[in-house]
Image (cartoon, helix red, strand yellow):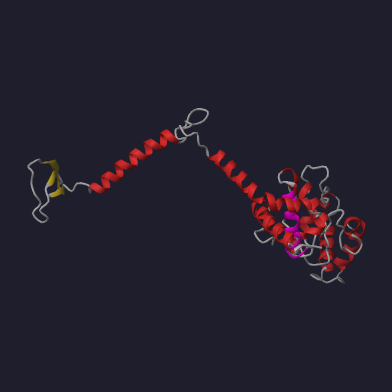
Amino acid sequence: MSTAHDSHDGAVDAATGTPTTGHEWDGIRELNNPLPRWWLYTFYACIVWAIGYWVLYPAWPLITGATPGVLGWHSRSAVVEQLSELQQLRAASSAKLAAVPLADIEKSPELLSLARAEGRVAFADNCAPCHGAGGGGAKGFPNLNDDDWLWGGTLEQISATLTHGIRSGDDAGHQGNMLAFGAILTKAEISDVADYVRSLSGAAPADTPSAKKGAALFATNCAACHGEDGKGNQELGSKNLTDGIWLYGGDKATIVQTITNGRGGVMPAWGTRLSPTTIKALTVYVHTLGGGQ
């Protein structure tokens, strides 16, 4: 049976020559090895530093806030100060961009460089979470590197989209949703339309009975927005169905889901969040990613 007891006989460990604490367990004695002085001094210094921090900076939580600290420093005020300094540094370049019409920025190498530099930062902070760091997009979020635009890819069109958004609640923004044809067509008819839609881009044969029936249904229900040739209408935000570029996916199951339930993505109206100069720089940046019209 194991036993433990304290002994205060001042014994010294024979193997190491170190005094013991008097604690023993199953014949094993605890050596009395004090902590190094440098460690203790560091520990005491940390205690002093912590007390000083509590006094100087916000530290202790209260019911509606925290102790302010004698220095009155706050992280929020520090961020505001840093942003103010950044704005002052950018003031000269921003003034140049603000004074030049949007259409003339890309004509000047200096202004183009300034706009792309500022636009790249704004894109990373505000747009990359949806469109990707390089603008490559994702399922449901357009690829900004190609030349396929739902609402138009000119400078003016991109600026309007950025400023007012898409289905964002801004009355000047792009409106309208794709209808949910599941309440209008049968499942068999939707399947036929999906076969025809896929045939427009060469993803499926156009001479099958299903695709032929789908063509008639398309002309009756879809051509008003997508056009009789399926090439879409940027004024309505309707997709070009002939280019093989798909926002949500071009497989039949996804297209059936789209036709059945409709689509209506949302983009914020950045005009209420970003300055006009930043919108201008962001417009130029997006336009020069590779797909600007």
Q: 51 or 60: nearer the eye?
A: 51
Residue 231 located within the stretch drawn in magenta:
no
**Quadrant in the picture for residue 136:** bottom right
Q: In the visual, does 100 lie left or right of 94? A: right
Q: So how many labels did they put on this image?
A: 0
The residue under the point 78% across, 56% down is: 258
x, y percent for residue 242: 83, 66
Residue 275 lies, with reference to residue 143, above or below; the image says: above
x, y percent for residue 245: 77, 65
- Magenta segment: 277-291
The residue under the point 9% across, 40% down is: 8
Residue 210 lies, with reference to residue 268, above or below; the image says: below
Q: In the visual, does 15 lie left or right of 94? A: left
Residue 290 located within the stretch drawn in magenta:
yes
The residue under the point 34% across, 38% down is: 48
Q: In the visual, does 71 lie left or right of 249? A: left
